[in-house]
Amino acid sequence: MAIPSFFVSFTKILVGFCLLCIVHKDFVVAGFEEVRVEHDTNEPLTNGSITTAGTGEDGRSELCGTDLSFLGPPYGNMSTAKMVCSPIWNTFVLRYHQREDNVMTIILSAVYTTGWVGIGFSRNGMMLGSSAMVGWFNRKGHARIKQYYLQGAHASQVIPDKGELPLNGIPPVVSLHGAMIYLAFQAKFKHRLGRQPILLAFGTRYPTGFHHLTKHDDKTAVWFDFSQASVLNIDTSQRKNHGILGLMAWGLILPAGAIVPRYLKHKDPLWYYLHAVIQFLGFILGLASVLLGIQLYQSMNADIPAHRGIGIFVLVLSILQVMAFFLRPNKDSKYRRYWNRYHLWFGRMALFFGSLNIVLGIQYAGAGDDWKIGYGFLLAITLLVVIVLETFSCMRRRRDKSNLPSNFQMNTI
């Protein structure tokens, strides 16, 4: 069957337009907002020289001018003039001092009522695999501060007294002063910290037995430059958009497009146009997901080799399928059967690895149950549709077979 020229032209225009939209520079750089810090390059960076967006002189003095002697030694003995102080998120204020031997004193403060407050150090801005210091006062007023290893998104996967922060022998401290809670600890890093992904969170419910954390009420992830005391806010919606695009492409649209030629070939040529349009739409969404994933990798150092590698492999398979559309032989060509096999099996491989990558992405991102339930729902609906269509297809084949005229042989005279 020849492909109408208007359909080919429309498809080329659609693909070109979507590619231009995807690689537009506004798409690439969206999602980051920097809080700049001004200081005199001739003087050491101190609390008196820091300004943040939306914070006036009086606000700085109130946030960073507090006497820390109530923390006790060694934290309370440190001069506030030597400590860098920076409002970092909401009511969170970060103070720190980095020595020449790479020992860093960190003091985090925030407005506190009940529950817990925490700061985490991440490799790539994600919760999974991070280590955090969390402090709180229990119902009896007893102070608690512990390191946690964030193995996953569930409360049971946030493991107390574990983690990779290189704490030194100085005991960490948590203290209340006015309306603020203060978490203070020291760590000796291998190198001087520069640009570092930081996780910040708080929960208003107390940790449960054996110090298991309750779910956070709010959280954020930022890039904090310890050399300049500047904050680069990470827009977590980029990760969410990457996941939504991948889920829509490989979890819904492309599987739906693959169902069409199997069960609607008796509706020729309608099935062909439906298959082509649906798959091109899925390809565009999948391509957008990959490009956004590349942007996330470059901006967040999201080093997830398996997820990234499978994503690129699936993209290559998808591009080969698009190329196959334009190189489709005629029905009477001797190469048509080879093309059919190629198109079928490459499509199946792309769908399989695309689905696998969705599962890996949900796992690596530490996504909540909503994502798992959502993808499980899509899989269930797809499976149900296939079962129903397969049943109708078998019934139709049996009916067509029963309507065939029976063979008979005439007696020879």
Image (cartoon, rainbow, N blue to C red):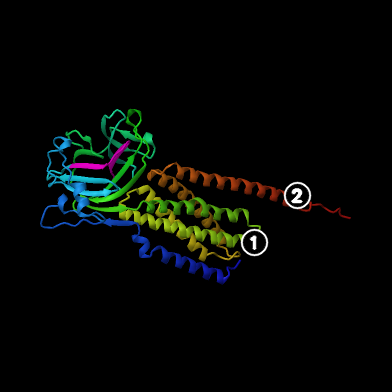
> What residue appears at the point 30 percent right and 51 percent down from the top-left corner?
301
> Is 368 covered by the magenta stretch?
no
Residue 368 visible in the displayed image: yes
Q: Quick one: label 2 or label 1, which is nearer the N terminus? A: 1
Quick check: 142 left or right of 347?
A: left
Quick check: 74 left or right of 111?
A: left
Crowding near the residue tagged with mark 2, few <14, some 14–19, many ≥20 C-alpha atoms within 10 Å? few
Q: Which amino acid does label 2 sit on?
A: Ser
Pinpoint residue 32: horizontal percent, then vertical percent. 32, 56
For the view shown, which residue lies furthest in the left direction?
42
Q: Residue 268 carries which label?
A: 1
Nearest to the eye among marks 2 and 1: give it: 1
Residue range in magenta is 105-122
Q: Nearer the viewer, residue 164 or 406?
A: 164
Residue 125 visible in the displayed image: no
Q: Which amino acid does label 1 sit on?
A: Asp
Q: In this view, does 209 lie above or below 51?
A: above
Q: Assess whether mark 1 and mark 2 are in contact (beta carbons under 8 angstroms).
A: no
Q: Distance between the residues labelled 2 and 1?
A: 23 Å
> What residue appears at the point 18 percent right and 53 percent down from the top-left corner?
50
Pinpoint residue 3: horizontal percent, then vertical percent. 57, 68
Q: Nearer the viewer, residue 196 or 304?
A: 196
